[in-house]
Each structure stands twice: as structure tokens, then as C-alpha cells.
Image (cartoon, grey):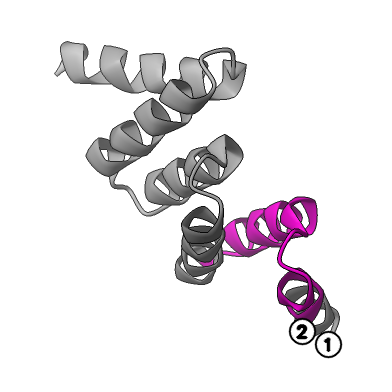
Amino acid sequence: RCFAAMQYFCFAKKDNIVVADRLCQILRNTNRIQEAAVITVNYIQMFPKYYVGWFNLAQSELYANRPETAKVFFRQALLLNPKHAESRHNYNMLLKMKKKK
């Protein structure tokens, strides 16, 4: 019931990005990765320069064990905001993992 209320709140007003971020975090943490990705993609389509959305999409890809796609999304987040420390860290970790193989 709480989830449904949060989801309604996110889409009732299109600029509720912070609430959408939290909802997606909850979904990823409860292994509902696909649902989180769908919400994030909707927000990215509305706000293409939404670097946190690209970061969240990359996180969803990591949860789904798709590191190559995650790398692409982290790179996009960094193009939009080069100072985003979490994107930089995760992107660099993925690059290091690839080198070790």
C-alpha cells in the first residue's frame, strides 16, 4: 500500500525526482530491479540531463549483473556531471575489474 502511494506521488507531479530516486532505491534493495529501471527510464526520458537517473540506471544494471551496460550508463552520468563521486568511483571500479580478467 505504501509502495502504491509512493508510485502515485512520483507520477502525479512529474518533477518529484527525489521521491522517484528513493522509490527506485527501495525497489532495487527488494530485488525488484526491472521495476526500478522502468521508473528511472521514464524520468530520464522526461529529463535527459538527469545525471542521478543515469547513475541509478547503472546501479540497476549492476544489480542485474550487466556490468558492460552499467559502464555505459555511469559514463553518461559522468558526462552530465563530471563531479559525481559515486559514478566516478563505480565506473573506475568496473574498469579495474575488466583489466584484472
When the figure is inspected, residue 43 is found, relative to residue 34, above or below; the finding is: above
- The circle drawn on residue 4 is 2
* Position of residue 75 in the picture relative to residue 77 (left or right): left
Give, as a single range, the part of the protein colored magenta.
8-32
The kind of secondary structure element at disc 2 is helix
- Residue 30 lies in what quarter of the image? bottom right
Disc 2 residue crowd, few under 14, some 14–19, many 20+, Cα 10 Å: few
Instruction: Identify residue for label 1.
Output: 1
Disc 1 residue crowd, few under 14, some 14–19, many 20+, Cα 10 Å: few
Q: Residue at x 40, y 43 (%)?
A: 62
The residue positioned farthest toward the bottom in the image shown: 1
Towards the viewer: 80 or 95: 80
Question: Looking at the picture, how far across and down is residue 54, in whole percent?
Answer: 48, 42
Q: Amino acid at mark 1?
A: Arg
Q: Is residue 11 magenta?
A: yes
Q: Residue at x 39, y 32 (%)?
A: 76
- The circle drawn on residue 16 is none
Query: Disc 2, disc 1: CB below 8 Å?
Result: yes
* 3D distance between C-alphas at marks 2 and 1: 5 Å
Q: Amino acid at mark 2?
A: Ala
When the figure is inspected, residue 30 is found, relative to residue 92, above or below; the finding is: below
Question: Looking at the picture, how far across and down is residue 65, in whole percent?
Answer: 32, 48
Question: Looking at the picture, how far across and down is residue 48, in whole percent?
Answer: 48, 47
Towards the viewer: 100 or 81: 81
Q: Main secondary structure of the magenta part?
A: helix
Q: Quadrant of the N terminus?
A: bottom right
